[in-house]
Image (spheres, grey):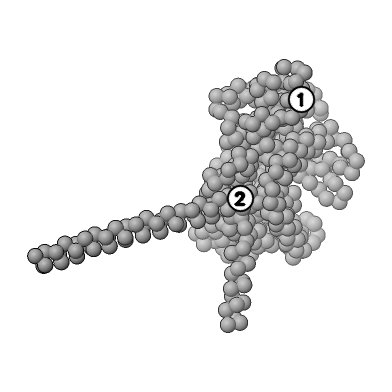
Amino acid sequence: MAGEKKKSTFWNFFDNLEGDKVVWMIALLLMLISIVAIFSSTSQLAISQNTSRMAIVTEQIKISILGLALIILCYSIRSIGFFRVFSQLGYAISMFFLIILATHKQIGPIKPIMVNSAWRIVQIGGFQVHVFEIVKVAMVMYLAWAVNAYRNDKFRIANLLGKKYKFWNKPLVKKIVYIYFPIFTVCIGIMVGSLSSTIFIGGIMFVTILIGGISVKELILPGVVAVGVLAACFGINAISPDDHKPFPHLESAKNRVTSDSIDNQIEILRTEPRNSKKFQETLDKMKQPVSAKIAIHEGGLIGKGPGRSTQRYVVPIMFEDYMFSFIVEEYGILGGILVIILYISLLARGSIIVRNCDNHFAKTAVAGLVLLITGQAMMHIMINCDLGPLTGQTLPLVSHGNSSFLMFSLAFGIILSISKMARRKIAREAERAAPLVEHDLNDEIESRLDDLDVLDTGTDDQNNE
């Protein structure tokens, strides 16, 4: 009896765990894969930092525990209104960090840092934070609030101004001020550091408001404006001095599409002297994507086995931008398929949660966050398979990177918290459905019994006659 009680208590822990259990499983499995993969893939990082792989994996375990704590913290929040209130700060938080990067000026303890010729990171005390990772989640939540407020006409400041100035009562004005203007200003801020991130995050933002109820027709004009703004940024860059270009990474993105093709790079390697600067720079550009393809090819069906990767010594950021290639090299196509299944399962569960949410803000937030996670995962995988230009997107909740890991943990926590509401609705519907099924079955049984009674009665009457 004691053993049976212990077993019951153990299972009750999982039974009492609220939120979508499949999403819980996906998050935990991705974290476990991250710890194992980073232990094997960080040889180059350990050498460059003069440390050991055990020290790096210990750090990843700490980040995973912190990420899990963040998930549990968000999951414990029982009011959707809490997320709605704090989502209003998403745009302000995003622009605050982007302005610091754009101006290259320190504000209080927050200091911008250039890494690999790009302004993408700020240092807060002793911690480095990747700004774009914050912007991704913050803007999805902000737009979920903004679209919901637009549908219900709950823009308090605009409505107060509308009492005095009728201009603010126009729906188009509210849409421009609260939805389109934030999207465009954030995209311009991101463009200072990365065009690929601008396109990806901008795309996620447009899809979020589309899911929130903004029609495709309404997005045609903003789309044309977006193309115009991009062209204007290229034009400003073209007339600016080489050492003072406002969007320095537009040129590198342009070169990737035009002059930096594989054929051109091979031609440079053939013609340039091996000790020249141009030869070395071209070799470095080719080394990472080519080695990633080699890793996938050598992985085969079942992989080389844990700790047997060779390309981790060639690609210096294998544990970040090329994590999927590493997983395939060591665990084969089967390991890669497992990772893909986890992200596709998240997309499927997210759609179920969205369908069962009564709250429009909750629906938009979950849909936006799920698309952000799965969209970045698919982009990472496609780039690793040489199906797109290098963008530097990590594999969510797997790749090395503290800021990315914690922000995606936050996203999972919000999804799980909102899923509790949907799960309760599913449970209520199931409870209401059960008696209906039993009632129909009982009615059918009683009807059959009545028919038998009539048949028996008729037979007795005939015998009596």
Which residue sits at x=62%, y=31%? 151
| Residue 311 in view here | no
Q: Residue furthest front?
A: 465
Q: Residue furthest bottom?
A: 1
Q: Is residue 454 visible?
A: yes
The residue that mark 1 highlights is 160
Please state the horizontal and vertical placement of residue 182, each as a whole percent of the image.
Answer: 71, 30
Q: Earlier in the sequence, mark 2 or mark 1?
A: 1
What amino acid type is highlighted by mark number 2? Met
Which element type, helix, strand or loop, lies under badge 1? helix
Find residue 416 and name its label. Answer: none
**Of residues 11 and 290, the one drawn nearer to the viewer in this rendering:** 11
Label 2 environment density (alpha carbons within 10 Å; few <14, some 14–19, many ≥20): many
Q: Position of residue 231 (x, y in %)?
A: 67, 22
Q: Which residue is mark 2?
A: 421
Direction right: furthest residue: 108
The image quadrant of residue 364 is: top right
- The N terminus lies in which quarter of the figure? bottom right
Q: CA distance from mark 2 to mark 1?
A: 33 Å
**Direction from residue 126 to residue 194 in the image, left or right:** left
Q: Name the residue rendered at 53%, 44% in the picture.
A: 355
Q: Hey, what amino acid is under mark 1?
A: Leu
Dividing the picture into quadrants, the one containing residue 164 is top right
* Residue appearing at x 60%, y 39% in the figure: 360
- Category of crowding for the residue at label 1, using alpha-carbon neighbours closer than 10 angstroms: few (below 14), some (14–19), many (at least 20): few
For residue 145, what is the image quadrant?
top right
Please tell me which residue is depicted at 57% across the width and 45% down the height of the picture.
Answer: 357
Q: Quadrant of the C terminus?
A: bottom left
**In the rendered view, would you say 253 is above or below 331?**
above
Q: Is residue 282 above or below residue 150?
A: below
**What percent of the width, then of the height, locates residue 9?**
62, 72
* As drawn, 54 above or below 190: below
